Image: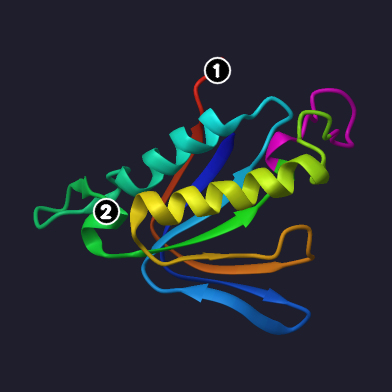
Amino acid sequence: MRCVVQRVREASVTIGGERFSSIGAGLLVLAGISREDTEADLAWMSRKLPNLRIFEDDEGRMNRSVKEIGGELLVVSQFTLYADASRGNRPGFTESAPSEVAQPLFDRFVELLRRESGLPVETGSFGADMQVSLINDGPVTIILESPKK
């Protein structure tokens, strides 16, 4: 599992011109599910994200987690995180899990993240054409990948 994590002041998802979901300060998480991902990958990521210390403490050091600041999470499925553009100019997506596999894993990941974090967790709409807006705070952007098997 691969996630691009952005510390945000706010973020939202719009679908068909209508606001679908939004958060205030917290994390925007673009989540990619690979063909190889299992429940263990989802569990690892759902434990890692709420405890990732990328928010500033009183001394200006990144030493606080989204849990510690009482933030929110917006999680958006992003199969393109497993794009392979090493040959040619058109990316291939063979490493991404097919949607019939990825959607239940994504839904399970969100469920685990809600339980692990105890924080509000909003989502995009799996497979939809979404416009994602954000105000990046810092900017701070981290790429996380579940441990290799």
Work out how far the residue at label 2 is from the one at label 1, CA to CA, in angstroms: 27 Å
From the viewer's side, name the closer residue of 52 and 46.
Answer: 46
* Left-right relation of 74 to 63: right
Q: Is residue 85 magenta?
A: yes
- In the image as oriented, which residue stretches furthest toward the top? 149
Give neighbour class at mark 2: few <14, some 14-19, many 20+ (Cα, 10 Å).
many
Left or right: 120 as drawn, with respect to 11: left
Prevailing secondary structure of the magenta residues: loop
Quadrant, the N terminus: top right
Q: Which colour scheme is used?
A: rainbow
Q: In this view, does 19 lie above or below 61?
A: below
In magenta stretch: residue 60 = no
Q: Is residue 54 left or right of residue 59?
A: right
The mark found on residue 55 in the picture is 2
Looking at the picture, how far across and down is residue 103, in whole percent? 72, 49
Q: Residue at x 15, y 54 (%)?
A: 57
Inspect the image, locate mark 2, and give the three-letter code of the amino acid beneath it. Phe
Indicate the quadrant containing the C terminus: top left, top right, bottom left or bottom right.
top right
Look at 51% across and 53% down and name the residue there: 111
Q: Which mark is residue 148?
A: 1
- Residue nearer the viewer, 4 or 118: 118
Mark 1 residue type: Lys
Residue 112's spot in the image, x, y percent? 47, 48
Question: Which residue is at 61% across, 57% downward?
Answer: 76
- Picture quadrant of residue 139: bottom left
Disc 1 element: loop
> Residue 105 got which mark?
none
From what the image shows, is residue 149 above or below residue 23? above
The one nearer the camera, 6 or 45, is: 45
Callout 1: few (<14), some (14-19), or many (20+) C-alpha neighbours within 10 Å?
A: few
Q: Residue at x 64, y 82 (%)?
A: 19
What are the residue bounds of the magenta stretch? 81-92
